[in-house]
Amino acid sequence: MFKRFVLIIFATGFMYTSSQAQTVIAKYAGEFMTFGVGGRANAMGGAFTAVSNDIAAAYYNPAGLASLNYPQIALMHEQKFGDLINYNYGAVAIPYGKDMSFGLSAMRIGIDGISDTRNALYDANGDGVIDVNDGYRLDESKITTFNNTDWAFLFTFAKRQSEKFYWGANVKVIHRNIAEYTATGIGFDVGAMYFPTERLRLGANLQDITTTLVAWSTGRNELISPTAKLGAAYSFNFLFGQFMPAADFDVRFENRKYASEFHAGPVSFDAHFGLEYKFKELFAVRFGYNDVKQFTIGAGVKLPKLNIDYSYAQFSNSENDLGKSHRISLILTLEEARFLR
């Protein structure tokens, strides 16, 4: 069944891509999809591929959604780089039968109220020609605004193949717009989780596995190259609670070279590191370091049926004036006998 599923998505992606003209492999075309979701994972530096045991798994590793025994609903808001970018996320996940789960996630990343001065240049002489000697002055009455918005929707399926092995997949629909220009895309992710021991977790997520096509209304079609996310996590009891260190490695094929932490020809490698300490399932503190050289920190509180998680991130280089990022997320678990898997 799994092999058949992989063949189907490869064939679908190939037919969809080959039917388009003028496509280009665009470096960083999928960068807007790398912000991650959830306060918990973000506080751990995004090192969540092997941890994925809540609704955020739909993004980090779709296989992890099979861990759920109760339905979950998630909401998140983040102010990135000060108040420059508004990032919102919502998701619902439902266990089905003895070994399957389904999920739907939506993400919106937006820069709103951008000043549009394209039609506001001032004609000082009234001759219909913009004179560079006028210093490109602006007629403020003609300045309008537009938004730069990216939407992504994930439709997730996950299955417990055995007690030690889970697998899952996403169908990913993308919609982008900037001013009057729009783009639409579709892609696929495939993930797996393996538990060699009770404490050790291994995970892999092959994002954009068929190469995701984003077709713009201008006629430009961009291809998002695949990314392989590999992760490991280990939990142990200490100081009246549980520690869980985790590490992820992103393997990309976009020829990023020195923009990445390590590279070998066109292949680049970036790391994420995280640590979580939970005290008796009541509260947690978390630390991390991600692939864009940000230190992250956060905390979480577990209430009856509700998890509240917060994370904070800033760049390690003090010369970067990109502001700070604050993220808060909520996970509601319908933890009642009638909803149990």
Image (tube, helix red, strand yellow):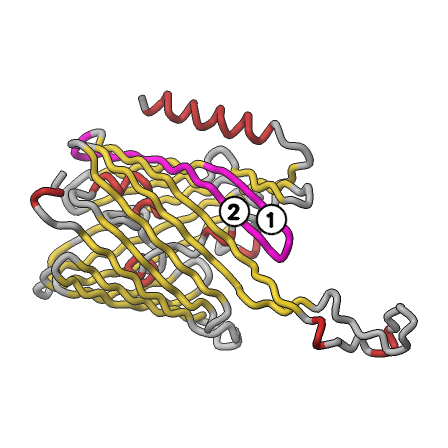
Which of the two residues, 130 or 27, is positioned nearer the viewer here? 130
**Residue 22 falls in which quadrant of the image?**
top right
Q: Identify the image quadrant of the N terminus.
A: top left
**Residue 21 falls in which quadrant of the image?**
top right
Residue 149 is situated, as x and y percent measured from the top left of the image, at 53, 56
Q: Is residue 253 above or below residue 43?
A: above
Dot 1 lies on which element? strand
**Residue beneath disc 2:** 175
Disc 2 packing (10 Å; few <14; some 14–19; many ≥20): some
User: Marks 1/2: CA distance?
Assistant: 7 Å
Which of the two residues, 207 or 110, is positioned nearer the viewer here? 110
Residue 264 is situated, as x and y percent measured from the top left of the image, at 53, 45
Query: Is residue 177 found inside the magenta-colored segment of the image?
Result: yes
Q: Which residues are magenta?
A: 162-187
- The reply to whether dot 1 and dot 2 touch (C-beta < 8 Å) is yes
> Residue, x 21% and y 55% (percent of image)?
332
Residue 142 is situated, as x and y percent measured from the top left of the image, at 71, 71
Query: Is residue 185 found inside the magenta-colored segment of the image?
Result: yes
Residue 263 is situated, as x and y percent measured from the top left of the image, at 52, 49
> Residue, x 22% and y 65% (percent of image)?
300
Q: Identify the image quadrant of the C terminus.
A: top left
- Identify residue type, mark 2: His
Q: Is residue 185 above or below residue 179?
A: above
**Residue beneath disc 1:** 182
Left or right: where 114 falls relative to 160? right
Dot 2 lies on which element? strand
